[in-house]
Structure formats: C-alpha cells, structure tokens
Image: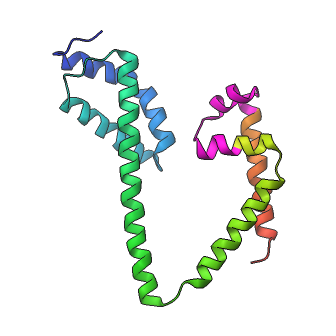
Amino acid sequence: MLTRRDPDALWALFLEQRNQILAYVRRLAPTGCDSRDVLQEIGLRLLDQPNLPLQRDELTAWCKVVARHIVLHDLRAIRYERAKLDALDADSFGDTCWESEKRAALRSTLLEGLERMDPLSRELLYRRHVLEQTSQEIARATNLSAAAVRMRLKRIRTATRSRMISTPD
C-alpha cells in the first residue's frame, strides 16, 4: 500500500497501470487522439491529488471513474455545440419536419429489425454497442469464443446494413 505523502510512488504506479487504463479509455473515447488526451488529463488530476491513499486496484478504479467523467463531460460539450449549430441551421433554413420524419422512419425500421433478431444477436449488439464491452468480455459472458463474437457481430452489422439500404426512404 502506498503512503499518503508519496506522489512519486503514486505516479510510478499510474505509469505501470497506464496500458490497462488506456485500453479502458479507448473504449470510451471517440478517437485514439481523444483517448491519449483523456489519459493525460487523468495524469494531471492524479498529480493534483497526491494524497490519495491507494493500492494498485484502487488506483485503476479511481482512474477509470475519472476517465468516464472526462469523456462524458467532453461528449456533453460536443452534443451541446451540435445542438446550437442545429438550432442555428433550423432557424436559418426553415422547417426540419422532413428530417424528423426520416429519423422516425429509420427508428421504426431499426426496431423492426431488432424484433426479428434472435435473442443472442440482440444480446451481442446490446453488450457491444450499449455496454461497450470488448469481444473478450462478451465471449466470457456468453460462453462463445472471442472470434465467434466478432464474426457474429460483423454478420449482424452486414445484414442490418443490407436491409437498411434495400429499404426505400
């Protein structure tokens, strides 16, 4: 266990856990560049709080919580900026009813496709795209191999794309 007054040991432990934390951040951040920025921000916040009495697992958990907060904050800021631009576009170019109708039709098509899928396919999609689990994590939860999970997800996405393209607007 680290002592309260040893920021160098805390930093060394952070560097030791860097790859594990970066793998988690990459699942959260939209791009690789963003993930490196988030990791750097975690390091800065760690340096600002050298009195954390942490062990290795506690440090990793703390870093993951901080990473999640940073990414969510950044995503909220992006969403806010996009909403402002969308409002500006709607004000500048008139009514967007056609867009909302198109989105409603797309949502309806996606829901119908999900209802036609077998339960395992829905679970795989849910775990990968909602819970953002890796193929290995999904494989452990579903008793499939990681390669089988990746292949099945690829087939589901391909089938969904082909249905979406063949569906008239």
Above or below: residue 110 compared with residue 51? below
Colour convention of the picture: rainbow
* Count of picture labels: 0
Is the C terminus in the top left, top right, bottom left or bottom right quadrant? bottom right
> Is residue 138 covered in magenta?
yes
> In front: 17, or 63?
63
Q: Is residue 148 above or below residue 35?
A: above
At a point 48% along the width and 33% down the height, the residue shown is: 23
**The quadrant where residue 3 appears:** top left
Q: Is residue 132 left or right of residue 123?
A: left
User: Is residue 20 a member of the stretch shown in magenta?
Assistant: no
Residue 4 in which image quadrant: top left
Residue 10 in the image: state x and y as whole percent: 26, 19
The residue furthest top is: 1
| Residue 83 on image: x %, y % | 42, 70
- In the rendered image, which quarter contains the N terminus? top left
Residue at horizontal 40 percent and vertical 75 percent from the top:
85
Give the quadrant of residue 163. Answer: bottom right
Q: Is residue 36 above or below residue 18?
A: below
Residue 126 position within the rendered picture, expressed as x and y whole percent measured from the top left: 66, 44
Considering the whole magenta stretch, tell me its main secondary structure.
Answer: helix
Position of residue 34 in the picture relative to residue 138 (left or right): left
Where are the magenta residues, as a range?
125-147
